[in-house]
Amino acid sequence: MCLAYAAYLRGEGSAHQVADICHSAAVRRSHQAHRRAVTGATHAELAAALERPAQLPQTVGSLGALYVRGDDVDWAAAYGPGGRYVPLPGHPWRTRRHWPGETTGTQQAGGLAEWIVGQHARTGFDDRSALAEIGFDSLARLQLAVEAQQRTGSEVDPEEVGRLRTVGELRAWIHRLEVAAR
């Protein structure tokens, strides 16, 4: 994870504020048993710290020391209100990315249906596959509603999205929206 975060900070993460990256990592991610805390004011400083061998610098502060020790830290209280959530690197054991709004090759090749299912499917699928069984959860349904409304200009009823059960139903529903938008 350290190397993934270092690469992210040197690449696509450089488009986001350091404070927002740290806030997202602290508040929106589950924390594992093996932990590391680093300090830095810039993307480059944080990336360099993550690439060095693990050690707890004296400057990491009391929250960092508690965190590395495995204690629970109330990050939401530490950061306070107003932090912006940004996409972060995936866990190394996950072989596919699932970031809302990320463009992939399937988006151009198969339209919205293929792109949205491809973003959230954690296993292989076909038209008979149940959305819930392939990892299509409530957040994926929300993303689908937003993307469908933005791309087609049609009003999307979230309850209608909630009634979709299979990949085939989802594809047919999106096809109807795309045809109506032409």
Image (spheres, grey):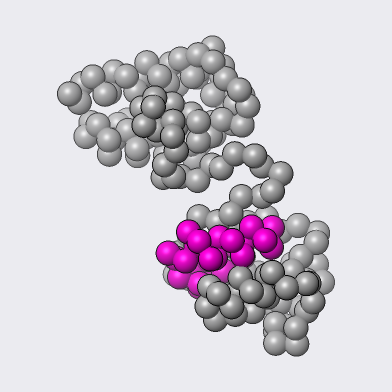
- In the image, taking residue 133 as reference, residue 12 lies left or right, namely left
Q: Is residue 158 visible?
A: no
**Quarter of the picture holding the N terminus:** bottom right
| Secondary structure mainly formed by the magenta segment | helix
Q: Is residue 51 above or below residue 136?
A: below
Q: State the count of labels.
A: 0
Q: Residue furthest left?
A: 182
| Residue at the image point whose x is 67% and y is 61% from the top | 3
Q: Position of residue 101 (x, y in %)?
A: 41, 45
**Quarter of the picture holding the C terminus:** top left
Q: Quadrant of residue 52?
A: bottom right
Q: Residue furthest bottom?
A: 58
| Span colored in magenta | 1-27
Q: Position of residue 10 (x, y in %)?
A: 53, 66
- In the image, taking residue 30 as reference, residue 131 lies left or right, namely left
| Residue at the image point whose x is 59% and y is 78% from the top | 45
| Residue at the image point whose x is 39% and y is 25% from the top | 110
Q: Is residue 153 visible?
A: yes
Q: Quadrant of residue 181?
A: top left
Q: Is residue 9 above or below residue 102?
A: below
Question: Is residue 161 inside the magenta stretch?
Answer: no
Q: Position of residue 154 (x, y in %)?
A: 23, 31
- In the image, taking residue 162 as reference, residue 95 lies left or right, namely right
Q: Quadrant of residue 103?
A: top left
| Residue at the image point whose x is 50% and y is 61% from the top | 11
Q: Is residue 70 above or below residue 97?
A: below
Q: Position of residue 12 (x, y in %)?
A: 48, 59
